[in-house]
Amino acid sequence: MSTYSVTSANFARFWFGQTLSQFGARIGTLAMSVTAIELLHADSREVGLLGAASTVCYLLIGLPAGAWVDRMFKRRTMMWAALVRALAVLVLPLLWFTGELGMGALYAVALVVGVVTVFFDVGYQSYVPVLVPEEDIAPANARLEATSQVSTLAGPALAGLLMRVVSAPVVLLMDSLAYFFSFLCLTATKDGEQQSDLAPRARGRLAADIGEGLRFVRDQPVIRRLAVSMGVSNFFATMVATLVPVLVMSTLGFDAFMLGLIMTCGAVGGVLGAMLAPRARQRFSLGTVMAAGLLTAAFFTAASPLAVLAADSSRVLAAAVLLVGEFGLTVGALLYNVTQVSLRQKLCPRNLLGRMNASIRFVVWGSMPVAAIAAGWLGTAIGIVPTLWIGVVGSVVTVLPILTIDKVLAAGEERPVVTEGMR
């Protein structure tokens, strides 16, 4: 058991490091998209491939990564992942300065960053129960989610503003530095994780360990429903997110600053969603909170294609529709995410957290490269706006698996399924 509470200076160091990491990630996402679209003149298909390169790793190594992380100390894993991300992103501005930057380099860096992010994210989602006591898990997740959004409030808008003055690859230097300082914060963080908390390193057990994580997700009724819901949600959300930069900069003709402002407005909504989640859980059932979050996000997703119709009347109106839509979308998304992450962590045994999170990431994030490629192909074949409407309709379906969660919890079926390896 950890002796460090959510109010301790130790948690504050970890909290600050993750804020920097999220700050850098938002800057990097925007700068890479702008680099591809504005400087390398990428089309919808190439933007889709770039999105696929950053997420295909969840299909390739997502499951074994969970088993490996369960055998390793979580903080140490996150430290080295943060350092590798810092070095990989640094390659892009160096190539730009030498005149050698191309889409191939963007694909390669996106792939490398994606691979180490798998390990970082699995370790991160498994680390909170190690860092704080059980009663602090939900408050810790709420603070981490809220401040990760706060850290991105100025990030995208600042990145967009900077790209009016300097080139997008220069802005990627900020991304690299943020990852490096995240690494330093992790080196100063202490926790109570011990060798006994780790899964045994038995030779030849990798496949068995992976299977154990998959079976837990399959057999745990609440977590199974969450996995299905998140898998469908991420597929259609990725379709929309892949095409939004193309919509904003190519179809509507806005610049990088406007794209950054839209992302910033989304971060404001994320802060509100993360702040509302603990209060909503006190007044409503968990299933109601999560369903409301998903439906809110789906409703505001329609703002992206509607902005094209609004542009026929006024570019100002189109910009307002995009800003309001991104704000509402992230309110709903964070309301759902804070609630479901805390619920998953409470229902899973500690020595299975990495494999449980990796199994869900395999399902949820594994759909993203397929969705990104599909968005790029459909955007070219039938147009960006019709493809966005497909994403909107699909987003509504994501709520269906959530509707029975309250009934399962009330029936007392939420207890973890005990397998031989967990005893």
Image: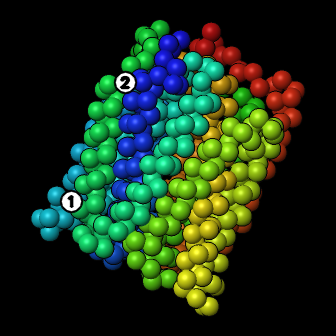
Mark 2: amino acid = Thr
Q: Above or below — where is 69 with respect to 107?
A: above
Residue at the (72%, 39%) spot, across then down: 279
- Out of 188 and 56, give the one closest to the viewer: 188
Q: Which residue is mark 2?
A: 189
Residue at the (21%, 53%) spot, across then down: 91
Q: Would residue 20 be found to the left or right of residue 268 on screen?
A: left
Q: Would residue 340 be found to the left or right of residue 196 on screen?
A: right
Residue extending farthest to the left is 98
Q: Above or below — where is 388 with respect to 372?
A: below
Q: Above or below — where is 187 with respect to 376?
A: above
- Nearer mark to the viewer, of 1 and 2: 2
Q: Would residue 334 be found to the left or right of residue 253 on screen?
A: right
- Out of 15 and 83, give the one closest to the viewer: 15
- Out of 32 and 111, give the one closest to the viewer: 32
Q: Secondary structure at mark 1?
A: helix
Q: Which residue is mark 1?
A: 93
Q: Above or below — where is 46 with respect to 318?
A: above
